[in-house]
Image: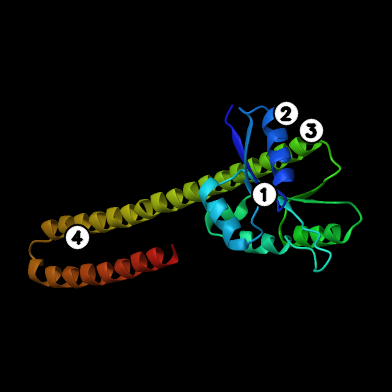
Amino acid sequence: MKSELVLIIEDNPAVARRLKKGLEDVGNSDVFTAETVCEFDIDAVTRAINSYKPAVIILDIIDDKSEEPKGHSFVSEIRCMPGELGKTPIIMKTRQNTEPFKAAVEGIRAGAKDIIFQEDGIESVINRIREAIDARKAANEQQLHYEQQRMEAERYKKRKKPTIISIIIAGILSAIQIILNFLAVSKEFLIIETSVMVSFALLSCAIIALIIAGVINRK
């Protein structure tokens, strides 16, 4: 089984190490590996995301008594990252019924996937991580299916154009053949008939050219 990397953003190195060890021991190292970022700075966070390209991010909400809780504001910054990195599932970690919990709710509104609590056991945390990974895979498969349908529709449109044009060209060739047969039968009126039929053929070609141009423009 492919190992899924979890990026832990936690200001307390001891807590980060415990969570990392728990994920790798209980989840088995062939299922989860973990890396930690203990600098609560958005530049350090985005560098780590670019470097590790994690399957899931666990983002701690710091409860600094002297300031407002930190961490939830990182969600919108991460969501602005280019490509698939900006879609990485984010699980916010906090304590229940606290100011950081209210901040985590704001993080959910900004695009975080879920909230876990410091009181949760490691098995519960692993289950939430797996749910986030499965949801991401399902969304990617749905997007892939949509893109395949769109490409098939484009190929169908391209196949239709030559069919319509080929019918028009066949009609032109048939008209020319009729004109030539008629001229061959009416030899005594060859000069008159030739000028009349050439004029008719040119007019027909002009009309058909306009039809073709209209068909192509509609496509």
Q: Residues within 10 Å of mark 4 (few under 14, many from 20)?
A: some
What residue type is disc 1 on? Pro
Task: Give the residue at x 77% y 58%.
Answer: 62
Query: 139 or 101: which is nearer to us?
Result: 101
Question: Where residue 119 appears, x then y in whole percent?
Answer: 86, 43
- In this view, the mark in front (4 or 3): 3
- First in sequence: mark 4 or mark 3? 3
Q: Which residue in the structure is indicated by mark 3?
A: 123
Task: Give the residue at x 23% y 70%.
Answer: 200
- First in sequence: mark 2 or mark 1? 2
Disc 1 secondary structure class: loop
Q: Which mark is residue 26?
A: 2
Disc 3 secondary structure class: helix
The CA distance from mark 1 to mark 3 is: 18 Å
Quadrant of the rendering where the N terminus is positioned: top right
Quadrant of the rendering where the C terminus is positioned: bottom left
Q: Which residue in the structure is indicated by mark 4?
A: 179
State which quadrant residue 61 falls in: bottom right
- First in sequence: mark 4 or mark 1? 1
The CA distance from mark 2 to mark 4 is: 86 Å
Question: Where residue 127 appears, x then y in whole percent?
Answer: 76, 36
What residue type is disc 4 on? Ile
